[in-house]
Amino acid sequence: MKTMKNIKKHYRSLRKDKRGIDTILAALLMVVIVVVASVMVYAWSTGLLGALMVTPQVGKEAMNIENSSFSNSTLATIYLRNTGTASISLVTYYVRDNNANQYSKTSWNVYTGIAPNALATVTINIGAQCGCTAASNNFVFVSGNSYTVIVVTSRNSQFTFTVVR
């Protein structure tokens, strides 16, 4: 059995022995150094990669219809004003009647680079001569009926307009 004197002596020797504490402090210091270095590498790499990445196109696409007219039962002309801050290129159009019948032209690249605040005269053609894809029920522009025209831009913005013949 240990005596009180031996126990006190043992505790004094533990307090004087700093090797255990030095090992713990060294390990903590290494962890702090690794964390700081990791944060610095992360900040540097995101700054570098951010500079190398492609910046998104600047500007907003917006269009308003100013007027519309019909030449015959298969040809409509719409006057569209680019009210946004980006140039607009039209790539697709859809025309729907009140019965949900639809014509669509998906390879429509005639109207490119409509500048901001510019007025574009857009011809919408339906019927056999337009090269469109038609729904099961073909239709023509009938006087007194309204039609929904959807134009899609090269940046995939969709603008919906209602025209009445």
Image (cartoon, rainbow, N blue to C red):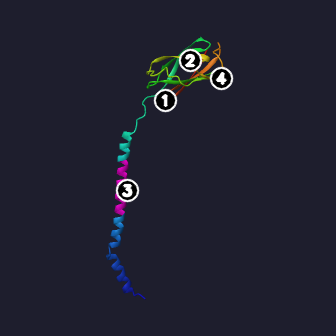
Query: Sequence-wise, which precedes: disc 2 or disc 3?
Result: 3
The label number, if any, that marks residue 35 in the structure image: 3
Which circle, 2 or 3, is nearer the viewer?
2
The amino acid beneath tag 1 is Arg
The amino acid beneath tag 3 is Val
- Report which quarter residue 141 is drawn in: top right
Please provide the residue range marked out in magenta. 28-43
In-front residue for pair 68/16: 68
Q: Residue at x 63, y 18 (%)?
A: 146
* Circle 1 residue: 155
Marks 2 and 4 close (CB-CB < 8 Å): no
Q: Identify the element where label 2 is drawn.
A: strand
| Above or below 48: residue 117 | above
Q: Identify the element where label 4 is drawn.
A: loop
Q: What distance separates the C-alpha of mark 1 from that of mark 3?
A: 42 Å
Query: Sequence-wise, which precedes: disc 2 or disc 4?
Result: 4
* Circle 2 residue: 124
The label number, if any, that marks residue 101 in the structure image: 4
Using a 10 Å C-alpha cutoff, classify the residue at mark 1 as few (fewer than 14 neighbours), some (14 to 19) or many (20 or more). Answer: few
The amino acid beneath tag 4 is Asn
Give the number of marks: 4
The amino acid beneath tag 2 is Ile
Query: Sequence-wise, which precedes: disc 1 or disc 4?
Result: 4
Task: Give the main secondary structure, helix, strand or loop, of the magenta stretch.
Answer: helix
**Magenta span has 34?**
yes
Q: What distance separates the C-alpha of mark 2 from that of mark 3?
A: 62 Å
**Magenta span has 25?**
no
Q: Residue at x 39, y 86 (%)?
A: 4
Q: Position of residue 74 (x, y in %)?
A: 61, 14
